Amino acid sequence: MNPFRVAVAVAIKDLRSEWRTRELVPALAQFIVLALLIANFGFQIDARDAPQIVPGVLWLALVFAGLVAFGRTFSAEREQASLEAMMLTPASPIAIFAGKAVAATALLILCEAVLVPALSLFFGTALDPGVVFAVLLATVGMAALGCLFAALVARVRARELLLPLLTLPLWIPFIIAGGQAVQAALGLPGNYDEAVGLLIDFDILFVVLTSLAARYVLDE
Amino acid sequence: MNRYRTWAALAVALMLGAGAAIYYAPTDYLQGVVQKIFYLHVSSAIAAYGCFAVVLVGSLVYLRNESAAADRFARSGAVVGVVFTTITLVMGSLWAKPIWGSFWTWDARLTSTLVLWIIYAGYLLVRRMADPGRQAARLAAVVGIFGFIDVPIVHFSVTWWRTQHPRPVVVNDALPPQMLATFLFTLACTLVLAAVLIGIRYRIETLLDARLRAIEPAPIVSAAPEAEPTA
């Protein structure tokens, strides 16, 4: 079986099931708007200090929305025991994992399409293409790691507790580089090109590593 | 007196010796007595790295051939490593307060050490929350490997800006000979202590595994077919 076609088929299956239920993306979009509301009450944000605070709000909202999104990717499969059914087919586990990761990434990008414009709408920061690019780059690597650990904890009892605990520390490289890139794009001191280069390095590294590890995660 | 007690007694004696050496080591001209934290702070940091290397090797071997012993070594290394990282962080904070003026700064070295602590504390929580068995061991092995990879990344990605923590002094030949001798002796003692602790923890993990097997019902190898009910 062609692994690319398997991956595409799994990704389309996940997106179709999300399209039919329309549960995750609206819930996450609402979650993101609520996070911005809380940020508004927690900080005193006005036009002067917005560039200092907005990058932090962006990453906090994105990280927690990501945790919810990746936690969901495998929980539906577990409830229906459909992952076992997929593993029974001759498709390679890595291709199945890649398909699920691609679908989760697409859903998270949809949420970012809410988050980034909402930030500039509510807090008046510029809708800079540099910000969008950095966020998208970080999403790739974060999705690879997030899906790997979501698959790992899917069969553990306390998975809602474990997923953030395991994923957040490993996401820190992306927050470091992505945070610097967004700060630089919003006019704070920092080297944008260097941070984006670092993001690309981390993406390559973690996509390769997670595809190596995927064999041990899904292969049961 | 079993051999574990012998080894433990040896390690404690060595640590007392290290304490005496630190006491008699020359006092730093600028920092005074506080500088003596250096010996234990750096030694336990190196011991922690060693423990996490044990976790890494144990996890890799476990994923390769599912050896229960490798998994137990990984578990033991994580416990001891977290203890030594805690010691490093606490002693570093105590040293930072009089010298830098605050217990904590978001410095590259401090941040990456804190991330190290969080990752391996998470590793221990995984072991506690997941039901023991193959699934938990695999999960933990992946965490152990990714955790070890993450730390140099965090370290180097922050090291390009904002550093307050001093650069390594031992390899740069910046220590006077008595201080260097004291440090090397303390380091050797701490490494022995770490190895002994891992050994003892390994024994405990073996016993825990054995108890788990005793509680679990024995697997049914071949069940005799039941007699057909007669009408």
Image (cartoon, coloured by chain):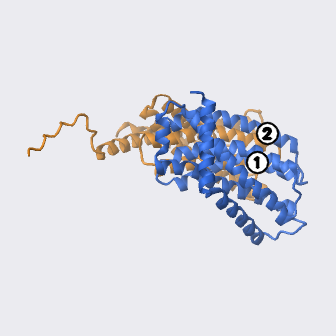
Chain colours: A blue, B orange
The spot of residue A100 in percent (x, y) is 60, 42
Which label was assigned to residue A176? 1
Query: Of B52 and A195, which appears nearest the observer?
Result: A195
The N terminus of chain B sits in image quarter = top left
Residues under numbered marks 2 and 1 in contact, where contact means CB atoms less than 8 Å apart? yes
Q: Nearer the viewer, residue B22 or A5?
A: A5
Q: Nearer the viewer, residue B204 or A18?
A: A18
The chain identifier of the residue carrying mark 2 reads: A
Q: Which residue is mark 2?
A: A198
Do marks 2 and 1 both belong to one polypeptide chain? yes
Q: Residue at x 75, y 59 (%)?
A: B102
Residue at the extreme left of the image, as rendered? B231
Q: Is residue B64 above or below residue A188?
A: above
Subunit that carries the residue with mark 1: A
Q: Residue at x 67, y 50 (%)?
A: A107
Task: Tell me if mark 1 has few (under 14), some (14-19) or many (20+) residues whose alpha carbon lies within 10 angstroms of its own.
Answer: some
Amino acid at circle 1 = Ile
Element on which disc 1 rests: helix
Please report the residue visible at 37 percent of the width from the left and 45 percent of the height from the top.
B208
At label 2, counting other C-alpha atoms closer than 10 Å, the crowd grade (few under 14, some 14-19, many 20 or more) is some
Distance between the Cα atoms at labels 2 and 1?
Answer: 9 Å
Q: Position of residue B185 (x, y in %)?
A: 61, 36
* Residue depicted at 71% across the width and 59% down the height: A61
Label 2 SS: helix
Is residue B96 found left or right of A96 in the rendered image? Answer: right
Tell me which numbered mark, 2 or 1, is placed earlier along the sequence: 1
- Provide residue B118's location: percent of width, then percent of height: 61, 50
- Locate residue A192 relative to residue B58 in the image: left or right: right
Q: Amino acid at mark 2?
A: Leu
Q: Is residue A175 visible?
A: yes
Q: Classify residue B44 by image quadrant.
A: top right
Residue B162 visible in the displayed image = no
